[in-house]
Image (cartoon, grey):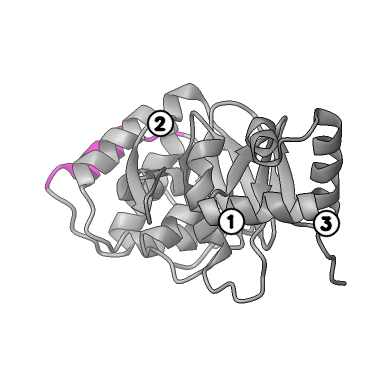
Amino acid sequence: MKYELGPLEAKLVFTLEKKGATLFNITDAKEILGCSEKVLRVVLWRLTSKGRIQRVKRGHYLLIPAKAGYKTKWSEHVFAFIDALLDEYYVGYWTSLSYWGMTEQMPRTFFVATKKRRRNFNYEAVFIRFVTISPHKFFGWTTETIGEQEFRISDREKTIVDSLDLPQHVGGVLEAVKGLAQDLDWNRVVEYTDKLRNRTVYKRLGYLVETLGLEPPTGIVERLQRNISLGYSWLDPTAPKKVIKTNSRWRLKININI
């Protein structure tokens, strides 16, 4: 169904589009329209019901781009506004694997790591999923740009470590495996694993390095081996809990084929 815009609705939308604004607040809208707060709230409600804007937090809205003639990926627009929406965050997990070319998959979920719990929401075709992590895990990002907009994203090494820490947010361990073939700073990988404080990550990482026949610098495998725990862990907690075999060296229950 096609919805026509009223004069004030059209003025707000077209002015924001002309400015290239994706995220705006009530003050921005009031300055553009020069109307009373009561009228403004009606305009915002109508635009929301027509699918042209979306409320993402109190007093803040996203402008939904018109689909006609729209040629860029929806995820690129999420990169463009995420930094304005959040103070402490980094784009991570499956989204980062895709960004760094570590997977051929194009996930429809956009993963964002935060220290504070936030409500997930949909932005047109993209589901924005906030992953709340402990403060000691909040590190290892770099700043990238799309157009003129900067955003924070986990670097390659943190992307690998995060993927093995919470594989449910990357589609399973097999997706993380694809990134291990990249040119990684292995000392940084181990340093990040140390800071993460999850001994299962040492196990998964060490097992995958040896199984895939990777050749990290001397001493890396030994550093991983020294930090594993005695109990057995699942190689992939997202896969069926059916043991194919056990690996005593890395104290893992193998439930997927690599």
Q: Nearer the viewer, mark 3 or mark 2?
A: 3
Depth order, front residue of 102/230 = 102
Q: Quadrant of residue 189?
A: top left
Disc 3/disc 1 C-alpha distance (Å): 16 Å
Mark 3 crowd level (few <14, some 14–19, many ≥20, 10 Å Cα):
few
Q: Is residue 224 magenta?
A: yes
The residue that disc 3 covers is 6
**Do we see residue 231 in this rendering?**
yes
Q: In the image, which residues are magenta?
A: 218-230
The residue that disc 2 covers is 196
Q: Are marks 3 and 1 in contact (CB under 8 Å)?
A: no
Mark 1 crowd level (few <14, some 14–19, many ≥20, 10 Å Cα):
some
**Do we see residue 119 in this rendering?**
no
Q: Position of residue 97 (x, y in %)?
A: 43, 57
Relative vertical location of residue 167 with respect to residue 177 in this rendering, above or below: above
Disc 3/disc 2 C-alpha distance (Å): 52 Å
In the image, taking residue 134 as reference, residue 57 lies left or right, namely right
Relative vertical location of residue 87 with respect to residue 253 in this rendering, above or below: above
Q: Nearer the viewer, mark 2 or mark 1?
A: 1
Query: The residue tagged with tag 1: helix, strand or loop?
Result: helix
- Which residue appears at 38% of the width and 63% of the height? 102
The residue that disc 1 covers is 17
In the image, taking residue 1 as reference, residue 204 lies left or right, namely left
Q: How many marks?
A: 3
- Which residue appears at 36% of the width and 59% of the height? 100
Query: The residue tagged with tag 2: helix, strand or loop?
Result: helix
Depth order, front residue of 175/247 = 175
Disc 2/disc 1 C-alpha distance (Å): 42 Å
Query: The residue tagged with tag 3: helix, strand or loop?
Result: loop
Q: Amino acid at mark 3?
A: Gly
